[in-house]
Image (cartoon, rainbow, N blue to C red):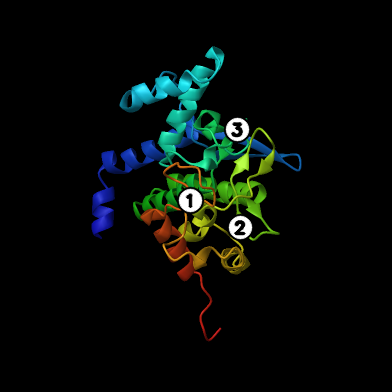
Amino acid sequence: GLRRAWLRPRDNIGTLALELDFWTENRTVSVTSAGKSYFLNHYWVPFGGPRPESYSKDAELAASVPGGHRETLWAELKAGAESGWDFSSRWLVGGPNPSLLSSIRTSRLVPVDLNAFLCQAEGLMSDFYSRLGNDLQAAKYRNLREQRLAAMKAILWDEERGAWFDYDLDNGRKNPEFYPSNLAPLWSGCFSDPGVADKALRYLEDSQILTYQSGIPTSLRKTGQQWDFPNAWAPLQDLVIRGGTQHRPHPSA
């Protein structure tokens, strides 16, 4: 009752729709697999210039690359900041020198966690509109979620490894590195095959990630960046722990 009362004012549900539609309209990328095109989202900030909050650092970093690459570098740094993972080797993989921040290429990767979050949001929006009796909008977001589930399965899910992986647009392949975000669809409940949960938990156990005494590391690369080994960030612990426990088979099963 309380949730429905909060949603009912047009500007409340409208604000939620605007936020979600922003990603669809401004951060969508097409990926082709087996002759079929899928639409997923990525981080991308199409504005150059150093970040105002880190102007001197960004200007200094840009001095280390050829002049024609500076605007691209600044845009990629902003995309990294948009991700919240500012910064991580996750955004450097596949770059000319994956140990240097100047190799950042955030927008060229399709992130598992972003798409898992948007998938969950589409499900919530469908539920909210259904509660308000707006079947047309409820169907819109339900269909968007179903399309995203199919895209995540085709592009991000790796059946052999049993987890989801960021997709590298430039190299046309998944990034096999470990990040807690590889398990984000477990947390958001964004998968259609129930057997996927068992495979993802096995991936976690096989990779021995749970053996680190200080928590699940943000990556397995030690680069000196904040979102890398051995740093363990609280939101990522929650994502993996809750994602794993809510789908763990019952002892009596």
Q: Quadrant of the N terminus?
A: bottom left
Q: Of the residues shown, which amino acid type is indicated by label 3?
A: Asn
Q: Residues within 10 Å of mark 3 (few under 14, many from 20)?
A: few
Q: Residue furthest right?
A: 34
Residue under label 2, please give it.
163
Q: Residues within 10 Å of mark 1 (few under 14, many from 20)?
A: some
**226 on left or right of 251:** left
Gap in angstroms between the C-alphas marked 1 and 2: 20 Å
| Badge number at residue 97 | 3
Look at discs 1 and 2 and give the one toward the viewer: 1
Q: Of the residues shown, which amino acid type is indicated by label 1?
A: Phe
SS for tag 2? strand
**Disc on the earlier residue, 2 or 3:** 3
Gap in angstroms between the C-alphas marked 3 and 1: 18 Å
Q: Quadrant of the C terminus?
A: bottom right
Gap in angstroms between the C-alphas marked 2 and 3: 26 Å
| Badge number at residue 229 | 1
SS for tag 1? loop
Residue at (59%, 60%) from the top-left corner? Answer: 192
Q: Quadrant of residue 68?
A: top right
Look at discs 2 and 3 and give the one toward the viewer: 3
| Badge number at residue 147 | none
Q: Residues within 10 Å of mark 2 (few under 14, many from 20)?
A: many
Residue at (27%, 56%) from the top-left corner? Answer: 3
Q: Of the residues shown, which amino acid type is indicated by label 2?
A: Ala
Image x and y of residue 129, in percent? 38, 49
**224 on left or right of 133:** right
Residue at (69%, 58%) from the top-left corner? Answer: 159
Image x and y of residue 65, in percent? 53, 19
